[in-house]
Amino acid sequence: MDRPVVDQTGLTDKYDFQLKWTPDDSQFAQFRGTGATPTPPTDDAKAPPSLYTAIQEQLGLKMGPAKIPDDVIVIDHVEKPSEN
């Protein structure tokens, strides 16, 4: 995912679930060097859906872009400490 995901479901419990999906080229790159062995991207019609489709179809959750307030820290100026 190329941006943060904000939970707006209102759910507070923890859930155990399985999600079957096929990473696309951008998602597959995240796993390189982690030791994980995800299924590479495929054109097979029987392959699990993309991550976004799987989340919506299997979990009933819809992801979409939204503008929300976010806290940020801005450093305007920095100086080295003076020697005492």
Image (cartoon, rainbow, N blue to C red):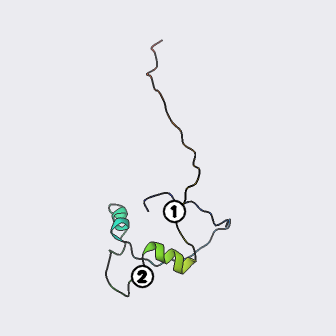
Numbered disc in front, either 1 or 2: 1
- Image quadrant holding the N terminus, namely bottom left
For label 2, the SS is loop
* Residue 46 position within the rendered picture, expressed as x and y whole percent measured from the top left: 38, 88
* Residue 15 position within the rendered picture, expressed as x and y whole percent measured from the top left: 62, 72
Total numbered circles: 2
Residue at the image point whose x is 51% and y is 62% from the top: 65
Is residue 42 depicted above or below 83 in this figure? below
Is residue 84 depicted above or below 3 in this figure? above
In the rendered image, which residue does mark 2 sit on?
48
* Camera-side residue of 39 and 10: 10
Lateral position of residue 68 relative to residue 28, left or right = right
Q: In the orientation shown, which residue stands out farthest toward the bottom? A: 46
Hey, which quadrant is residue 35 in on the image? bottom left
In the rendered image, which residue does mark 1 sit on?
65
Which amino acid type is shown beneath numbered disc 2? Pro
Hey, which quadrant is residue 32 in on the image? bottom left
* Residue 21 position within the rendered picture, expressed as x and y whole percent measured from the top left: 43, 77
- Asked if residue 35 shows in the view, the reply is no
For label 1, the SS is loop
Which amino acid type is shown beneath numbered disc 1? Pro
